[in-house]
């Protein structure tokens, strides 16, 4: 049996998405900037996808800027907002457990003369609104938080965070990294006071190399890709029409079945936690079972005492089970997870933690098979580790 349980890293594209991408690449391949019919066909795909996405966010198509994925969306949001508003101040606020595409970008901005305050989080990955309020200064221009943590599935209350930020200073730009939240829950940026929002296509059964940035009305973003002036000059370059078309369709499909998918994901998560209870030395991180629906439906962080996560990942891989030792992006920079440290995971468990992440395609039988293999593998690996 093959069990793919690493959907927070990437998802399998929907069959209809693959078909549409292939059609656009082979048949409707015109450059959307061209004035002839083929070009207009390409432009129509881009417009239609923007409309499909805008419908899910209850915004206007003009608020959607297409990117190459979540990393570019986060870079564009942070660098673009910081440089567009630097005359008002150079202070930025974020949390201590952001994705590397936010964290590394903020380190770059610090090198450019900006100052960043990193807010702590509690064991459930939540930010204190009082601490946030105290961190806001007259020269604060940007607050950036992730809606769902990609390693442990903690959900930040972005509505309350937004209200706190805007009550202190209404012109602060509020950016939300929604890469693990979009397609799993309803998000209404304008209503919630979100100015900029990042999304990635391959996390929602769309094509890799696609994503978008929601930019609210009157929000200033400084472009850092220059050229032909596409996308209102905010992101020049010939649009990835096949990918954009596939992304639009994926968003439509995910939100058409949102509640059904959410219920299924929570069922799988609940069931896995229940089955893990049969094992000794297992800790579920940032998730209290009675309050499971206060966490993301598709991500579960699990520590298994005495077993190194990297060894366990490969041992499970040999049995056809695919999980992660943390963020897929962090695999290029191996080391102890800053997220696990931030939520207070015991030192002895920091290198013994895996991430299991589901999709609506995940079956209970896959979870049963995974538990069977864990029961067999973990005690052996623990003995080996102790030696």
Image (cartoon, helix red, strand yellow):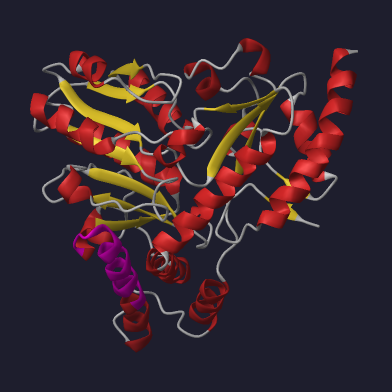
- Quarter-of-image position of residue 43: bottom left
Q: How many marks?
A: 0
Query: In the depicted view, which residue is nearer to us: 277 or 248?
Result: 277
One can see residue 177 in this view: yes
Q: Position of residue 334 (x, y in %)?
A: 65, 25
Q: Residue at 31% of width from left, 69% of height from top?
A: 52
Is the stretch drawn in magenta largely helix, strand or loop? helix
- Taking 362 as reference, is 244 above or below it? below
Q: Position of residue 341 (x, y in %)?
A: 53, 16
One can see residue 209 in this view: no
- Quarter-of-image position of residue 58: bottom left
Q: Is residue 299 left or right of residue 216?
A: right
**Residue at the bottom extreme, as displayed:** 37
Q: Which residues are magenta?
A: 45-60
Q: Could you tell me which quadrant the N terminus lies in?
A: bottom right
Q: Is residue 90 left or right of residue 202?
A: left
Q: Could you tell me which quadrant the C terminus lies in?
A: top right
- Quarter-of-image position of residue 227: bottom left
Q: Is residue 308 left or right of residue 252?
A: right
Q: Residue at 75% of width from left, 45% of height from top?
A: 370
Q: Is residue 122 left or right of residue 3?
A: left
Q: Position of residue 236 (x, y in %)?
A: 32, 56
Q: Residue at 35% of width from left, 18% of height from top?
A: 118
Query: In the depicted view, which residue is nearer to us: 144 or 368?
Result: 368
- Taking 123 as reference, is 320 above or below it? below
Query: In the depicted view, which residue is nearer to us: 339 or 39?
Result: 339
Query: In the depicted view, which residue is nearer to us: 353 or 195?
Result: 353
Q: Position of residue 330 (x, y in %)?
A: 59, 32
- Taking 341 as reference, is 160 above or below it? below
Q: Residue at 27% of width from left, 60% of height from top?
A: 231
């Amino acid at each position: 049996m093959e069990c793919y349980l690493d959907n927070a890293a990437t998802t399998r594209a929907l069959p209809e998405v693959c078909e549409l991408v292939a059609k656009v690449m082979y048949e409707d391949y015109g450059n959307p900037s061209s004035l002839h019919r083929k070009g207009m066909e390409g432009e129509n795909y881009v417009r239609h996808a923007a409309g499909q996405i805008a419908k899910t966010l209850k915004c206007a198509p003009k608020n959607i800027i297409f990117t190459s994925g979540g990393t570019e969306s986060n870079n564009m949001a942070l660098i673009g907002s910081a440089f567009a508003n630097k005359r008002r101040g150079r202070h930025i606020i974020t949390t201590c457990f952001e994705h590397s595409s936010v964290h590394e970008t903020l380190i770059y901005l610090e090198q450019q003369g900006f100052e960043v305050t990193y807010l702590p989080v509690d064991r459930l990955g939540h930010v204190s609104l009082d601490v946030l309020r105290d961190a806001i200064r007259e020269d604060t221009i940007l607050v950036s938080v992730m809606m769902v943590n990609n390693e442990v599935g903690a959900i930040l209350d972005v509505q309350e965070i937004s209200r706190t930020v805007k009550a202190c200073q209404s012109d602060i730009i509020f950016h939300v990294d929604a890469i693990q939240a979009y397609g799993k829950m309803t998000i209404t940026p304008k209503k919630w006071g979100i100015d900029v929002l990042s999304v990635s296509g391959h996390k929602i059964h769309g094509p890799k190399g696609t994503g978008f940035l929601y930019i609210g009305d009157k929000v200033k973003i400084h472009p850092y890709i220059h050229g032909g002036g596409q996308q209102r000059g905010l992101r020049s370059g010939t649009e990835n029409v096949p990918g954009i078309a596939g992304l639009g369709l994926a968003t439509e499909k995910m939100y058409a079945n949102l509640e059904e998918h959410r219920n299924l994901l929570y069922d799988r998560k609940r069931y896995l936690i229940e089955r893990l209870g049969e094992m000794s030395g297992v800790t579920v991180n940032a998730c209290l079972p009675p309050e499971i629906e206060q966490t993301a439906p598709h991500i579960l962080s699990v520590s298994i005492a005495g077993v190194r996560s990297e060894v366990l990942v490969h041992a499970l891989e040999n049995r056809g089970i695919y999980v992660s030792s943390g963020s897929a992006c962090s695999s290029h920079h191996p080391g102890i997870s800053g997220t696990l440290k931030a939520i207070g995971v015991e030192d002895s468990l920091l290198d013994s933690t895996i991430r299991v992440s589901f999709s609506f395609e995940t079956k209970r039988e896959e979870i049963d098979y995974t538990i069977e293999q864990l029961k067999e593998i973990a005690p052996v690996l623990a003995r080996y580790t102790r030696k």
